[in-house]
């Protein structure tokens, strides 16, 4: 049962990268709180399975495939939402890519272009499109999923870390300029989380032996532990919160790790 502070009944929420991981966990949680979730990622088949599961659990979900790195796809996604619902109240910019793991000086420029296209330009364009639709409806809330790597770059994750730092500044810029529209914009900074996206790190036993002792909670997060931070920021409970970052990393950054 949704409590008033976190009640999203009647809200339309778009979550990208929602076929698995943090995006899926967030979609399920927002649906539990009453939102009609529009889930998006590249593959329609994967989305359909998640949407069916949410509906089977009593929630409302619509699956629309779109590539975060393709401008035409993002425009079509927002147009589809406008056509079906006539409004958008919540955007969770979560879809991202991290195609290169290695020394920063060896990064192929094609990997730089791909990472920036999805993680910066994709976030920017979708936030711009969504905020205009939110303005028309009287306001809304955007949450960009950044990373603790945006505060302190991860080893061998140079270009990914750089794009996540840009997401933090992007969040503050949208928060400042969209506030008069009643649109709030915040960022969540997850730490190491058990997802397919992060499997190169979470499945690396040697790396985990180095990282886990630096995390005060001494473990990797589960996607369902990141989703409540997102729920808070899109809910009425955070009505006076904009332009901020919420770190969810088991204490790693705040307690001096890395």
Image (spheres, rainbow, N blue to C red):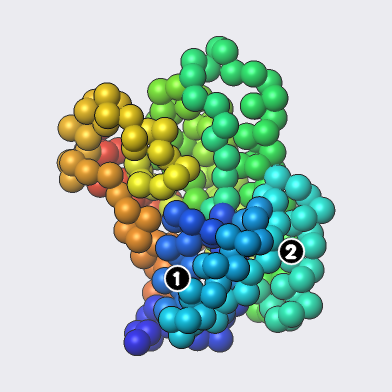
Q: Is residue 185 left or right of residue 4?
A: right
Q: Taking 90 as reference, is 31 left or right?
A: left
Q: Which label number is shown at residue 77?
A: 2
Question: Which percent across, then down, holds residue 135?
Answer: 69, 72
Q: Residue at x 76, y 71 (%)?
A: 80
Report whether 208 appears left or right of 54: left
Tell me if I can see residue 35 in this picture: no
Q: Is residue 98 above or below residue 249?
A: above
Q: Is residue 148 above or below residue 30?
A: above
Image quadrant holding the N terminus, namely bottom left
Pick the quarter of the image with the C terminus.
top left
Looking at the picture, tell me which residue is in the foreground, 46 or 71.
46
Image location (x, y in percent) of residue 151: 42, 35
Q: Quadrant of residue 6?
A: bottom left
Q: Secondary structure at mark 1?
A: helix
How many numbered markers are drawn? 2
Residue farthest to the top, as pictured? 105
How many residues crowd mark 1 within 10 Å: few (<14), some (14–19), many (20+)? many
Q: Residue visible at 18% across and 45% down?
A: 217
> Residue 75 location, x and y as percent?
79, 59
Q: Which mark is residue 153?
A: none
Which of the 4 image quarters holds residue 205? top left
Identify which residue is drawn at 48% across, 62% down.
24
Pick the residue in front: 197 or 154: 197
Q: Which residue is mark 1?
A: 28
- Residue 198: x and y, percent? 42, 40
Q: In whole angstroms, how far apart are the C-alphas of marks 2 and 1?
A: 20 Å
Question: What's the residue at 54%, 35% (across, down)?
Answer: 98
Of mark 2 and mark 1, the one earlier in the sequence is 1
Near mark 2 (Cα within 10 A), the count class, few <14, some 14-19 or many ≥20, is: many
SS assignment at label 2: helix
């Amino acid at each position: 049962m949704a409590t008033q502070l976190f009640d999203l009944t009647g809200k339309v929420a778009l979550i990208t990268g929602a076929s698995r991981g943090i995006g899926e966990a967030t979609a399920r949680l927002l649906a539990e709180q009453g939102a009609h979730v529009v889930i998006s990622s590249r593959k329609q088949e994967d989305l359909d399975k998640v949407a069916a599961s949410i509906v089977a659990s009593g929630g409302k979900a619509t699956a629309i495939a779109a590539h975060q790195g393709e401008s035409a796809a993002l425009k079509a996604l927002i147009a589809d939402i406008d056509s079906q619902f006539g409004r958008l109240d919540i955007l969770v910019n979560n879809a991202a890519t991290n195609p290169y793991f290695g020394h920063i000086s060896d990064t192929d420029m094609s990997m730089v272009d791909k990472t920036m296209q999805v993680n910066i330009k994709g976030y920017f364009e979708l936030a711009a499109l969504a905020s205009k639709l939110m303005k028309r409806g009287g306001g809304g809330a955007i949450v960009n999923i950044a990373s603790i790597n945006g505060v302190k770059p991860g080893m061998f994750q140079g270009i990914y870390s750089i794009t996540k730092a840009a997401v933090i500044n992007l969040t503050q810029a949208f928060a400042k300029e969209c506030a008069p529209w009643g649109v709030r914009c915040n960022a969540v900074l997850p730490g190491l989380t058990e997802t397919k996206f992060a499997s190169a790190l979470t499945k690396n036993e040697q790396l985990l032996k180095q990282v886990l002792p630096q995390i005060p909670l001494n473990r990797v997060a589960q996607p369902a532990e990141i989703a409540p931070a997102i729920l808070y920021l899109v809910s009425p409970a955070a009505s006076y919160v904009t332009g901020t970052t919420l770190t969810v990393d088991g204490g790693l950054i705040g307690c001096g790790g890395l």
